[in-house]
Amino acid sequence: METATQWQQLQPSYIREILAASQQPDIISLAGGLPAGDLLPVNELQPYIEALTAQPDLFQYGGSAGYEPLRQDLRRRYDLDKNSELIITSGSQQGLDIIARTYLDSDTHIALEAPCYLGALQVFQLSGATICPVRQTPTGPDLEELEQLFHTTAIKLFYAVPDFHNPTGVCWDLKTRQAVISLCQHYGVFLLEDSPYRALRFIGESMPSLADLAPDITLQLNSFSKTVTPGIRLGFISGPEQLIDQLLRTRQAMDLHSPLPFQQVLLEFLKSPTYSLHLNKLKQVYRDRYTALAESLRNRLGNQAQFNEVEGGMFLWLTLQEDAEQFAERALAAGVATVPGCHFYPPHYSADFNAHRTLRLNFSHSSIEQLRHAVDRLTEIL
Amino acid sequence: METATQWQQLQPSYIREILAASQQPDIISLAGGLPAGDLLPVNELQPYIEALTAQPDLFQYGGSAGYEPLRQDLRRRYDLDKNSELIITSGSQQGLDIIARTYLDSDTHIALEAPCYLGALQVFQLSGATICPVRQTPTGPDLEELEQLFHTTAIKLFYAVPDFHNPTGVCWDLKTRQAVISLCQHYGVFLLEDSPYRALRFIGESMPSLADLAPDITLQLNSFSKTVTPGIRLGFISGPEQLIDQLLRTRQAMDLHSPLPFQQVLLEFLKSPTYSLHLNKLKQVYRDRYTALAESLRNRLGNQAQFNEVEGGMFLWLTLQEDAEQFAERALAAGVATVPGCHFYPPHYSADFNAHRTLRLNFSHSSIEQLRHAVDRLTEIL
């Protein structure tokens, strides 16, 4: 059976190979985007899991917007604007997809920073929309390039990961946040703010989100995959009520609703005092792992590999003095899985952005010892 | 923000109102498609739910095709052809959506029986494909009309619910199954067989599925929403390996994978002896409820409402001697929620099929007493 035209734009994902490689026992994987396996709060969730069957309604069909008690809690917890609403989604990946299907046509143009989260690129490819990349700087998107793009092209949506970007770890400064919002307001561009790493700041002070600063023009995605557990696939979209209502109709056609039982488990965990203890522990461990990786890289690789400091998230973005794809192949042979930067660019754009010398390293999923050992192995092959 | 062109074809769903109405305490709802709430096997699931946190890997990211031990079990349990594979989906609704996004374009033509499952109509509308309805007879699709359609139009896919169709309860006879397959083979049409009710046969002998008869050209959807619990949102797509591989790529972009913990719970339940006990109980109760509803309708409504007998599933399809939308409004005012048949037809086609006099009644979710009481109320307003 012939596949759909738009489907043919969908690139095969490197993620599958990443996951396959990361499951081999002798490989140290800095390739995936997995949270620390040893810190998954399974014991903390246990009492809420055990109590599930006391609520048989959790096993019946539910509403498409999500489990109402969880929605109520999230509205308060995330301090939603009075004109805003939210839908519980099956991870923020599904949130991206719901938005793409509601607003993107094959003649739509969308903007995003390059490099970009791979899963977002896939969703946008599948929608058939034209992807317009804007170069990323250490403080956020290149504002001149962004304005130039907005000026010359009717951009509908700007996809942004302002907090601890995947793959670069970049966190936009406040000035850039304000400038991007001004440009979007001026040119009538909506913002799609993806915030899976926002709660994982381990150094410095939190900055207002785009949704905080401009709730009228922002759809925000949040995920519990990085802060609680990815296996339960829960996240949410929040934004102006009118848009959420349109998204809800799309979502209903897609899979009716997210599974109910773990929405209840998540709610109880978020309400419990153990949640903030867990989050603090996670941030402390990620800071220690990041620090160990950064120090090892500086000490062992010196000028041969450069990177900017990060203040949170799960990734460090290395720029080599050689081709990163070839390097990643040698690294894998030496027992370290990484992702060459070129995979994070839209097709045909990678060369323009010096992507061929970049490499993403994950520091959330490996122990300090493994991270140091990985750098030892990388040093040997450089 | 302006919505996508294809999205604008998506009809607002009657399901939302159905669910809202069915939650009011003084209403007897024959409107939804909910399994019996009092038979949800929550106690049977309890030991497997309690054991979840002993497997922390269930809380980490998983593969897009689903939890491997469950996939293995399903391959055996459903006796998959050696060239077939399967993907675990978030309900069969998501299965429909994955298939639509992989194979349907805005210039694709697909065939389906009219009337049709509402959620399938929504998915096909969202894909932008042209929907070509074929009249349903008591033994399956009208074969002459189907051949005429295949002859005049390049149909890519025929969407079929051969076992206890939603909304009509029709079960295709063997001759029709074979004839449809011959036509599909002759005209190069793929089959999309939706089987959520197949396991709910409570009278007579099971018939081979289209996937059994023609595995090379059939994608089959199965769901655990009717046989186990809908709240956990689990189903699967099975079919030729090459197609499943394409579907897998689509699915990965959509939401990565279905939640893992309840895939493990489902696996343990399917493997336990309590599963077949539960299924037998379910079929027995549904048979009793159906019989009570059918008898009450015959005794109380006589010639004013006609229906064909069903041998399984959850629905009975009534043809009135008056307009069903007006009747359903009066019924709701009298405390009985139903769904007028016109909602199950593609737009602009309902009038052609005498839809305005039909009504879908669900018998799985109400007790025998409630069903009899509902018929009392309907009798009063006829």
Image (tube, coloured by chain):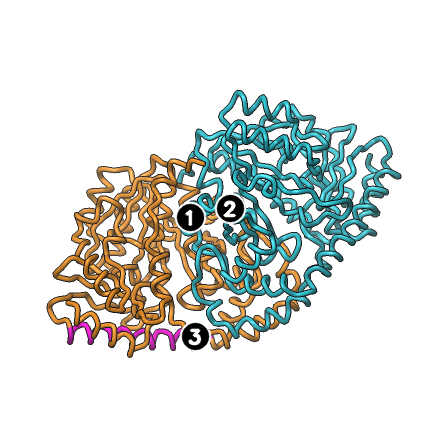
Chain colours: A orange, B cyan
- Disc nearer the start of the sequence (1/3): 1
Please provide percent x and percent y for residue B202: 76, 48
Task: Let me know if residue A226 appears in the view.
Answer: yes
Left or right of A165? Residue B377 is: right
Outermost residue toward the right in this view:
B299
Residue A90 sits above or below residue A311 on the image: above
The kind of residue tagged 2 is Met
Identify the chain of the residue marked 3, using the numbered disc in the image: A
Q: Amino acid at mark 1?
A: Asp
Dividing the picture into quadrants, the one containing residue A313 is bottom left
**Label 2 packing within 10 angstroms: few (<14), some (14-19), many (20+):** many
Q: How many marks?
A: 3
- Local secondary structure at mark 3: helix
Displayed quadrant of residue A360: bottom left
Distance in Å between CA atoms under marks 1 and 3: 30 Å
- The image quadrant where one finds the N terminus of chain B is top left
What mark, if any, has residue A254 been given in the picture? 2
Marks 3/2 same chain: yes
Q: The residue tagged with tag 1: helix, strand or loop? A: helix
- Position of B20 relative to A67 (above/below): above
Magenta residues: mostly which secondary structure?
helix
Q: Chain of mark 1?
A: A
The residue under label 1 is A97
Label 2 residue SS: helix
- Residue at (53, 20) in percent of width and height: B152
Q: Which residues are magenta?
A: A275-300
Is A366 left or right of B269, judged from the image as shown? left
